[in-house]
Image (spheres, helix red, strand yellow):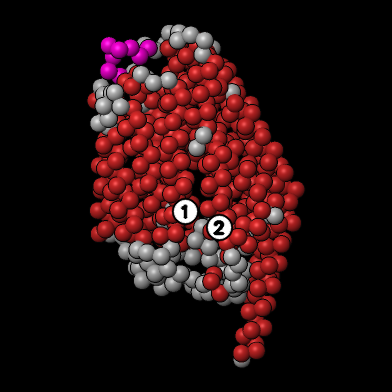
């Protein structure tokens, strides 16, 4: 397999420079790649498939953060503390994290369209059922949020592989970048739609009934529009032609790949911070407004804790996600002409710059709402700079036959040590610091616990700086392995010929 033919089903978002550098001068001698897809899917159907998959990805993240948009209402309705509130995100992430490899295994062997259709149908029905949870049975809401992870795992692990089987080279990376840009947009819409639908209906339960209906539409589109492409048919020379090792050997090799290990821990810090802010930021802003007298507090006589903070935070999430990802990639591309360590340095810079702005946003919440939003905007923008770059780094420091294993391992570690526990941890710390149940200590305890995010961001920046020490060595090792495999294939062909 030649270096220029990347066949991993997890292609980088923006990888033209990084992959081109690996190919060297021999790339110029090769004919241009075949653009016509032999996957059995027409160009129009393939384009529609990508748009449908992006639409479903948007719904996934909308549903994931709808709960955060109405969290004050949920706390008031069930009478729960911050620790139990944090569990809502934790049970979902844990379910999603442990089931994603299972559905990835199934998706490699069985009909992907059918698996996604069943999973999304299950997700929609469970989400709808969660909106009817009785006030006395909070554990039912926890159970249903955990089951939602089953449906989302069935989709998010499979959809990128379908796109990878529809397009090659630049078209593939372009389509995958569009697919992943749905993450910040969907996350922001989750806050916006959840809070606004709850306000209009005067009942937070209706916020959880929007995405199920849109999800059933997605199932119909999957069944009647999407066509299952042939696995690997789009590739001129499938990856399985390369020498493969056992799973344990792959894990052993990855553990010695310092760039992969360190960047994974750096990305875990990103997951910790984003998971904490995703659940708690709107609630924190609401409590700050109540403490400052700008909002009416939740009470037993109100059916809804009215607040515009979820709407504003959702809009900020959409804009900063798009701006951060784009700026991170563009800056990295420019710096690659000056240093091969550009990618980890950009990731480190993003995290280290986000830390002080997030700290200022949390500290200034009681003094100036406008300043808080401005600091959150800057902090989230810098935090989002590494999303696409981390995925690209993984692909060029890991040999093609280990990339899927590396992707799965990075997902498990970043969720397990990151956003699976961080929302619950922030809630528990907040409860432990609260001296009384006054508005002051409801705000102050959550404020102090959220300061942990700034320190974790600094630690993550340190991991990316350490990655910069090894990135060039590990990348050259990957290139040399691919070159050796190519030479071996040539010798085998020569002997057979």
Residue 454 sits in quarter: top right
Identity of the residue drawn at 53% across and 66% down: 7
User: x%, y% of residue 48?
Assistant: 33, 58
Identity of the residue drawn at 46% across and 62% down: 164
Which of the two residues, 431 or 152, is positioned nearer the viewer here?
431
Numbered disc 2: secondary structure: helix
Identity of the residue drawn at 63% across and 62% down: 249
Q: Is residue 312 above or below residue 396?
A: above
User: x%, y% of residue 339?
Assistant: 73, 51
User: x%, y% of residue 128?
Assistant: 26, 37
Tell me the number on the disc at residue 159. none
Q: In this view, does 382 lie above or below 169?
A: above
Residue 185 visible, this angle: no
Q: Residues within 10 Å of mark 2 (few under 14, many from 20)?
A: some
Identity of the residue drawn at 52% across and 26% down: 426
Task: State the count of labels.
Answer: 2
> Which segment did they paint magenta?
297-304
Which of the two residues, 56 or 437, is positioned nearer the viewer here?
437
Left or right placement of residue 255 versus residue 439 in this view: right
Left or right placement of residue 118 versus residue 493 in this view: left
Residue 307 visible, this angle: yes
Task: Report the Cα–Cα distance between label 2 and label 1.
Answer: 10 Å
Work out whether mark 2 precedes mark 1 in sequence or the reverse, and give the earlier one.
1
Numbered disc 1: secondary structure: helix
The residue indicated by pointer 2 is: 405
Q: Is residue 50 above or below residue 286?
A: below
The residue indicated by pointer 1 is: 101
Secondary structure mostly taken by the magenta-highlighted segment of the chain: loop
Which of the two residues, 489 or 344, is positioned nearer the viewer here?
489
Q: Is residue 73 above or below residue 338?
A: above
């Amino acid at each position: 397999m030649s270096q220029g033919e990347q066949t991993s089903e997890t292609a980088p978002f923006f990888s033209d420079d990084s992959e081109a550098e690996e190919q060297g001068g021999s790339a110029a001698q090769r004919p241009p790649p075949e653009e016509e897809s032999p996957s059995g899917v027409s160009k129009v159907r393939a384009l529609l498939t990508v748009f449908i998959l992006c639409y479903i990805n948007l719904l996934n993240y909308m549903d994931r953060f709808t709960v955060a948009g109405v969290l004050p209402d949920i706390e008031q309705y069930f009478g729960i503390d911050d620790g139990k509130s944090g569990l809502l995100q934790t049970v979902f992430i844990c379910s999603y994290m442990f089931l994603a490899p299972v559905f990835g295994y199934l998706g490699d062997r069985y009909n992907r369209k059918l698996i996604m259709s069943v999973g999304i149908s299950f997700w929609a029905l469970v989400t709808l059922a969660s909106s009817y949870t009785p006030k006395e049975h909070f554990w039912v809401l926890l159970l249903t949020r955990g089951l939602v992870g089953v449906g989302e795992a069935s989709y998010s692990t499979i959809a990128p592989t379908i796109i990878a089987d529809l397009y090659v080279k630049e078209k593939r990376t372009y389509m995958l970048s569009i697919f992943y840009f749905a993450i910040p947009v969907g996350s922001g819409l989750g806050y916006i739609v959840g809070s606004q639908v709850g306000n209009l209906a005067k009942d937070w339960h209706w916020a959880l009934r929007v995405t199920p209906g849109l999800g059933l539409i997605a199932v119909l589109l999957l069944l009647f529009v999407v066509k299952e492409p042939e696995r690997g048919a789009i590739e001129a020379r499938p990856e399985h032609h390369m020498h493969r090792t056992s799973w344990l050997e792959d894990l052993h090799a990855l553990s010695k790949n310092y760039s992969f290990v360190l960047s994974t821990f750096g990305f875990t810090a990103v997951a910790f911070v984003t998971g904490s802010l995703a659940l708690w930021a709107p609630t924190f802003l609401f409590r700050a407004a109540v403490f400052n007298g700008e909002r009416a507090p939740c009470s037993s006589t109100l059916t809804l804790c009215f607040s515009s903070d979820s709407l504003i935070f959702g809009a900020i999430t959409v804009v900063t996600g798009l701006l951060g990802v784009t700026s991170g990639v563009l800056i990295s591309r420019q710096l690659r002409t000056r240093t091969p360590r550009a990618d980890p340095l950009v990731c480190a810079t993003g995290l280290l710059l986000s830390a002080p702005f997030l700290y200022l946003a949390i500290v200034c919440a009681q003094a100036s709402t406008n300043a808080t939003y401005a600091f959150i905007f800057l902090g989230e923008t810098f935090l989002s700079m590494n999303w696409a770059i981390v995925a690209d780094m993984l692909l060029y420091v890991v040999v093609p036959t280990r990339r899927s294993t590396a992707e799965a391992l990075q997902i498990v570690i970043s969720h397990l040590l990151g956003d699976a526990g961080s929302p619950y941890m922030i809630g528990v710390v907040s409860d432990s610091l609260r001296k009384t149940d006054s508005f002051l200590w409801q705000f102050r305890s959550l404020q102090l616990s959220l300061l942990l995010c700034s320190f974790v961001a600094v630690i993550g920046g340190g991991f990316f700086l350490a990655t910069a020490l090894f990135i060039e060595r590990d990348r050259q090792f990957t290139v040399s392995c691919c070159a050796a495999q190519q030479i071996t294939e040539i010798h085998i062909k020569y002997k057979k010929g």
